[in-house]
Amino acid sequence: MIEQALAGKMADFRELGFPEYSRREGQIHRAPHVVSILVGARRVGKSFSAMQFADDLIKEGFTVLH
């Protein structure tokens, strides 16, 4: 069920593209089969960092594994 939801969201991003955003310097570290969590104060760019991360995954050809 979660895999279907993720696949749907990724398909939406591929189809609609991302809105314009300014790239952030920080980097989200990732490891296989581990969830990354963004923590920070309000209005510091967590949502845009997550969008940049998703955009990078799509450009790398990421797909949801079953």
Image (cartoon, rainbow, N blue to C red):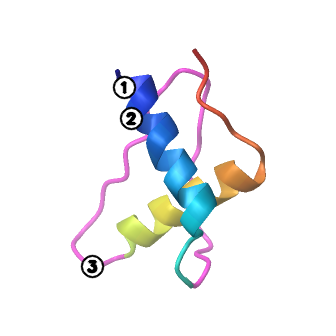
Q: Amino acid at mark 2?
A: Ala
Residue, x 54% and y 20% (percent of image)?
33
- SS label for mark 3: loop
Q: Main secondary structure of the magenta part?
A: loop
- In contact (CB < 8 Å): disc 2 and disc 1: yes
Tell me if I can see residue 53 in this picture.
no
- Which is nearer the eye, 20 or 38? 20
Q: Residue at x 60, y 61 (%)?
A: 15
Q: Which residue is mark 2?
A: 5
The amino acid type of the residue labelled 3 equals Arg
Above or below 39: residue 49: below
Q: Nearer the viewer, residue 12 or 60?
A: 12
Q: Earlier in the sequence, mark 2 or mark 3?
A: 2
Q: Is residue 28 magenta?
A: yes
Specify whether 11 is left or right of 39. right
Please state the extent of the stretch shown in magenta in the rendering. 22-44
**Residue where numbered disc 1 is placed:** 2
Q: Is residue 28 left or right of residue 39?
A: right
Residue at label 3? 43
Considering every residue shown, the one lying at the far top of the view is 66
Disc 2 crowd, CA 10 A, few/some/many (<14, 14-19, 20+): few
